Image (spheres, helix red, strand yellow):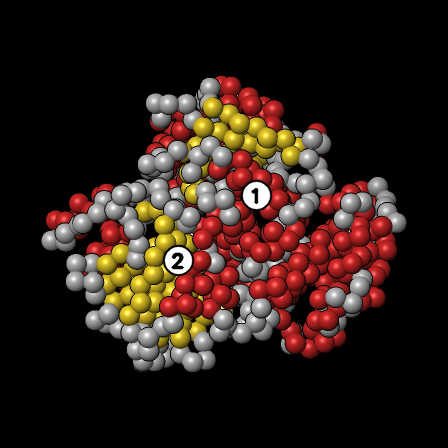
Amino acid sequence: MCGITGLFDTRAQRMPERERLHRMNESQHHRGPDEGDLHLEPGLGLGHRRLSVIDIATGQQPIFNEDRSVGLVFNGEIYNYQELMVELQAAGYRFRTKSDSETIIHAWQHWGQDCVHHLRGMFAFAVHDRRRGTLFLARDRMGVKPMHYALLDDGWLLFGSELKSLMAHGGLPRTIDPLAIEEYFALGYVAEPRCVFKQARKLEPGHCVLFERGKAAPTPRQYWDVCFTLDNQIGVDDACAELRDRVQEAVRIRLKSEVPLGAFLSGGVDSSAVVAMMAGLMDDPVNTCSIGFDDPQFNESAFAQTVADRYQTNHRLEIVGSDDFDLIDTLAHLYDEPYADSSAIPTYRVCQLARKHVTVALSGDGGDESLGGYRRYKLHMMEERMRRGLPAALRRPLFGALGRLYPKADWAPRMFRAKTTFQAMARSSVEGYFNTMGLVREPARQNLFSAELHRELQGYNAIDLFERHAAKAGTDDPLALIQYIDYKTYLVGDINTKVDRASMAHSLEVREPLMDHKLVEWLATLPSHLKLRDGEGKMVFKKSMEPMLPHDVLYRPKMGFAVPLARWLRGPLKQRVRSALLDKGELAETGWFDQKEINRLVDQHERGMHDHSTPLWTLLMFDAFLRNVSRAA
């Protein structure tokens, strides 16, 4: 695992400035504290920070082919590199190292842009081919590893693992994209391919892009997508057996390491399954770690201990105080963009704990998306059954009118809260799921934005992002459709971003077997009723793991990494909220927000009239982002 960065002259062959490249590279020192190096030549600069995991002796980067005409910087792991090495050696290529990095070099020489189809793993890399005058950027299928890039007005292309490496160059304009603000307040993150700065972009998962010197800026090309065929006629018992085998293989190929390796163990189904598989594949006890909270409402460490005891792991538990909120500015620096998922705090802490004992950790991330595990999936399917009971031509105007007219009654017993139900019935499937995933929902988001920001948005709404992905999903199955949307938005923009930044802040490599693309492809062939049945998510996965995990671990309610935001914002963070949101500071100076609306939110939350913790936390993290940008300027 590493940090990569570089510059490519798309117009001529100007010599890059070493000092700029050095700043870009060192801004990501945390991603690779073991080694670092630069390569400069006319028209090109490559930088690399290394976290040594495989082929420690000879795996340094940037790495080149025999005549140094092809150079590479690479972040990630290629799990099938040894098989590819044999295939490429048979084709006449000679290897000087035992690293997966050199495998990519020769794969590029042999297959060109199609090399990505042969790679199984998590990766973001840049290949420079001097003879062709090209720079090729690629990102793994599930978006586990990040890739940012920006084409400057003077023709220099910048790229890097994190946005901070582009910012360190000094030439990237810090002009904030108003559309990114809309996406952030709608979803809690800026979704791919957009960046918070107008001139920068994220390379989307399963995409690559080829820059050719002297030619116009290219459009990224999609080389992979998940296809929900749902046509696998396999029975439940056979599906369980095959799923166990496929998960075991995905775990097995991720166990190769020359440094200490372990796993996160939250006590949930996914991480517990990964640990159970590891225990069956490893000779030594698995190193596991988890964090607990001193508030029982948020603490699931007892379930983690149950699994640890069953498999006799070397288990480490650390209790985190429920007032662990001192990371706000740290998170703003780590994420570079505004990011509002408060579970970033416990994720940071569990990575911090893991790094004390291991350099590589396996996680259970991605299981909920592929296997239908989220509670929101069940609720969405309930809404869909109601929607599909009436034709849209009748349903939308009828329930839309009822939703507008019926009074909002959050205080009333659930049976009298019909307004929300009427509104849900009036929406399409995509509109309904967008509302479910909304952080600051409409009309609250519209009320929060100033007239100036509304003018800059020119009618853009973040739902356009969901509609764009839904149009490419290739399925009208209601569960598969929202799984596809989650793959393209929440999984990459929220989960993968959170885990990458939190882990690399501590120089920890995290591997995700449940995001193995071959496993994901197979799961997409299974009918939805094998994933969500009778209100039980992950049905086939839980059933498949019954021989390996306790019933209480498999079938208890999902908990997740939650933090007590409402209490924080009324108590220990009250003054921070007032200072950031009510004073004439960075946030107010943007002119993008309605100050009267912010005042109302703060006042009502402090007095306990309403829980406005979500919009207030989202504003607080946006303010922290603005402060971080000002400090970095």
Q: CA distance from mark 2 to mark 1?
A: 22 Å
Answer above or below: position of 331 versus 311.
below
Which is nearer the eye, 451 or 164? 164
- Identify whether 43 is placed above or below 95: below
Pointer 1: what residue?
Answer: 348
Q: Closest to the observer: 591 or 330?
A: 330
Q: Position of residue 618 (x, y in %)?
A: 69, 56
Q: At 69% from the left edge and 77% from the top edge, which residue is drawn?
A: 455
Residue 482 appears in the picture as rendered: no
Q: Quadrant of residue 277?
A: top left
What residue is shown at x 78% (from left), y 45% (from top)?
A: 572
Q: Is residue 365 above or below residue 485?
A: above
Element class at badge 2: strand
Residue type at mark 2 is: Ile
- Indicate which disc residue 4 carries: 2
Residue appearing at x 86%, y 47% in the figure: 608
